[in-house]
Image (cartoon, rainbow, N blue to C red):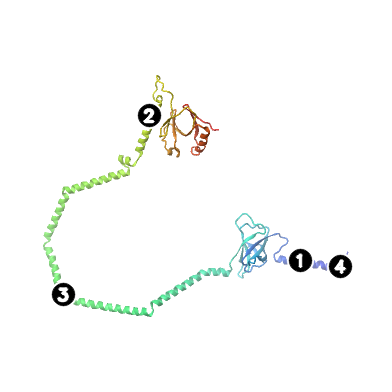
Amino acid sequence: MKISEHIKIGFIVFFSTIILIFGINFLKGKNFFVQENYYYAVYDRIDGLTESSPVLINGYKIGQVRKINFLPDNSGRLVVKIVISNKFKLPKKTTARIFSSDLMGTKEIKLIIGKLEENHIVGDTLSANIEGSITEQVSLQMLPLKKKAEDLMQEMEKAIEVVKYVFNEKTRDNLNKSFASIQSAVYNLEHSSSTLDTLVTSEKGKLERIFSNVESISQNLNDNNEKITKIIDNFAAISDTILQSEISSTITKASKALTDINVIVEKINKGEGTIGMLINNDTLYTNLDDASYNLNRFVEDLRINPKRYVHFSLFDFGKSVNIIDNKKGIKKSNDKNIYKIKLKSSNQPIPLTPENFKGLQNVEETINNGIYIYSVGNKSNIKKIKKMHSSIKNIFPESVILNFKNGKVTQIQKK
């Protein structure tokens, strides 16, 4: 089948039109063979940004501006649609900044990548701002210099005003009068000097008599020098006598005694010596108090359990009784099941103070077979003592529950 010339021409025109449309769009930056993602940015002004303006990341072109339209809210703001290659993902907080790419003011968009790991989805609106033009940046740089120059000019104007005020006509008259007064003062000084010279000349005789009298007094002192020396020697002898008398010795001894007392008091305050240690250190009092307390415990234990210390086969003193001492009295254990929480045990007694048991109070001491057991709680119900034990373990992890019955102590096993 032969194709007519009209059909051939139609096909040629059709394909030429398609190629032309493709070429125009390609020149505009539209590439139908590359998949692109689009995003939006909203600006108050765009300062000459146009469609097909490049979109850059670190100076590398990854897309372009596709459309620029006004927002429909009549606010005058502009929404810019940008498209970039789908190879690039934009993290959250990415900013689209309009900037001048050359001195002619050509505008482009620079993407400042955000620091978040999460990415924008296609169609998101990016944060937007605009970089000032070169003129604006120069103005910002020159603004401080302009301000300083204006301040300098104001200071200069003030200084000129001060100079004009100082050297006004009235001030010049005052300066002339001041110089005239200085000249008059110099003249008066010269006149006074002349008057003083005249006075000295006229009173020369009186001055000579005054000097003569002074010389006579000096001569008399010289003539009576020996007598004056004897008077001074007598005063010195009287002073030595007073110094060598018992009063002087007594004052010296009293001063020495006061010095010694001060030394002793200072040593006592420092805790030196027996008296100083007794006054400044409460160890002796504490030891005496502990000794008295231990002696009372020993006497009470000896009274209740005599066979622990003295053994007689002819007498039966009964069974031993455990002593529980909390400095508030002596208690005897009974035959019931009593549950307590053992905190620690020792071969030597430990003072029942909260400081020795991590702040716990009402700690009891039980003597069992010569071992001092320190415990808290006094319950006949095993559930109550276990509940109490759960809180005590936070302070004493090594604590255990003991069962006191008929003078025997057994440990409750954990379940």
Front label number (3 vs 2): 2
Q: Check the picture and name the quadrant holding the C terminus.
A: top right
Whether label 1 touches label 3, CB < 8 Å: no
Question: Dot 1 surroundings within 10 Å: few (below 14), some, or many (20 or more)?
Answer: few
Secondary-structure class at tag 3: helix
| C-alpha separation, residue under disc 1 versus residue under disc 4 | 23 Å
| Residue 60 visible in the current orientation | no
Q: Earlier in the sequence, mark 3 or mark 4?
A: 4
Amino acid type at circle 4 is Ser
Residue nearest the viewer, comparing 365 with 270: 365
Amino acid type at circle 3 is Lys
Q: Earlier in the sequence, mark 3 or mark 2?
A: 3
Q: Earlier in the sequence, mark 1 or mark 3?
A: 1
| C-alpha separation, residue under disc 3 versus residue under disc 2 | 115 Å
Q: Residue at x 13, y 58 (%)?
A: 229
Question: Dot 3 surroundings within 10 Å: few (below 14), some, or many (20 or more)?
Answer: few
Q: Residue at x 30, y 43 (%)?
A: 268
| Residue 213 visible in the current orientation | yes
Q: Which residue is mark 4?
A: 4
Question: Dot 4 surroundings within 10 Å: few (below 14), some, or many (20 or more)?
Answer: few
Whether label 2 touches label 1, CB < 8 Å: no
Q: Residue at x 17, y 50 (%)?
A: 243
Secondary-structure class at tag 4: loop
| C-alpha separation, residue under disc 3 versus residue under disc 4 | 158 Å
Q: Which residue is mark 2?
A: 299
Q: Is residue 233 above or below residue 349?
A: below
Q: Which residue is mark 1?
A: 19
Q: Earlier in the sequence, mark 2 or mark 1?
A: 1
Whether label 4 touches label 2, CB < 8 Å: no
Q: Which residue is mark 3?
A: 204
Front label number (4 vs 2): 2
Secondary-structure class at tag 1: helix
